[in-house]
Amino acid sequence: MHPISHTDLILNPDGSIYHLHLLPDDIADHVILVGDPGRVAQVSSHFDHIELEKSNREFVTHTGSYKEKRITVLSTGIGTDNIDIVLNELDALVNVDLEQRKVKSEKRSLNIIRIGTSGALHADIAPGEQIITRVAGGFDGLYHFYKDPGKYNLKALARSFMDHTSWEKSLAEPYFIKGSENLLDLLSGPEVVSGITISTPGFYAPQQRSIRLFPFDPDLVSKIGSFRFDGMRINNFEMESSALYALSALLDHQAITICVAIANRVSLEFLEEYHGAVDGLITMVLDKLTLDD
């Protein structure tokens, strides 16, 4: 196997990976992703011990321990394009010999949990409720740039969704990827809403918001709300999970997203003070991670 080129695998002078500025020993097997760099400290404030703090641009990383479980928390910033950077660089840290620039023969699989906020798409999901993503759907198109082994994109679901919404052919074709069954089982509960999450490539028109510009299909939210497939409905909008699920599946990592609904796009309710709800979600995730061996 030829070494990976310096333009494909970019390292900093200290040997750390280009954007994250991390070294292989800096990350734990359990990785919590958050969008907001400020939320990293909110998570690590629960740790018993913090062994490492590093940052570059929007990528802030703390690694420490919670009840003797080593955990890394890392901010991604907003969007699937940033997830593309984070997932590829995390994988390189654990599955590529950075000095030799060669893929390792033995692979390491990370448990990756995204904790975030989202907008609910049904009136019966109140702001403050937790939503776990069984399947992530992407309007972003990122998955289609990667060589597809043909087994991760749920094509029947994608076709049904496009037919139901009369999907505009000029847009990227939606894709749908399952999350980790193990992490889904670990974090699910009677109070957690489960189903499909849609990741969009923007916050305004892609999520049917308008200020001075208007979305091309003003009925998309209602179409999404009435969609059902295999007993599932689409519960919420956010901006990262489709890429997280797609790249984790392709790279053989375990990934799941669990969000607090801070807005309801049907009832038009908004949770002004959601710090406490997010902190409750963080505590729940950390406690359940200590049960995962």
Image (cartoon, rainbow, N blue to C red):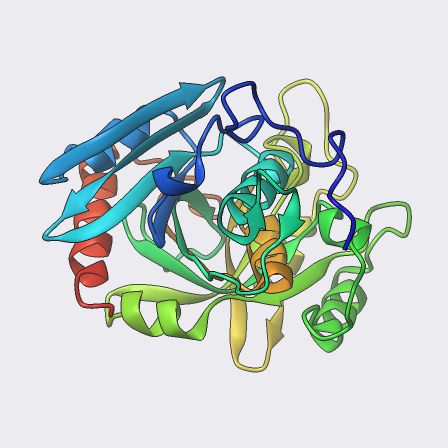
The quarter holding residue 39 reads: top left
Q: Nearest the camera: 146 or 259?
A: 146
Q: Is residue 230 above or below residue 134?
A: below
Toward the right, the furthest residue is 170
Relative placement, left or right, of 212 versus 18 is right
Across and down, in percent, residue 16 comes to 50, 28
Relative to 129, say whether 193 is above or below.
below
Task: Say which residue appears at 66% left-offset and 49% top-offset.
Answer: 102
Q: Please state which of residues 290 and 94 is positioned toward the viewer in this rendering.
A: 94
Q: Residue furthest bottom?
A: 230
Q: Is residue 11 left or right of residue 293?
A: right
Q: Is residue 111 above or below residue 117?
A: below
At 18% from the left and 37% from the top, the residue drawn is 276
- Quarter that holds the N terminus: bottom right
The answer to whether 30 appears left or right of 148 in the picture is left
For the residue pair 179 and 204, the one nearer the viewer reads as 179
**Residue 50 in view:** yes
Residue 141: % across, % down: 76, 48
Work out whether residue 263 or residue 170 is closer to the camera in this orientation and state it.
170
Q: Residue at x 24, y 72 (%)?
A: 190
Residue 2, percent from left and from top: 78, 49
Residue 289 image position (x, y, % from top left): 23, 60
Q: Residue at x 47, y 60 (%)?
A: 108
Q: Quadrant of the C terminus?
A: bottom left
Q: Is residue 263 visible?
A: no
Q: Kindly indicate the quadrant of the structure image that contains residue 125.
A: bottom left
Tag count = 0
Quarter of the rendering containing residue 277: top left
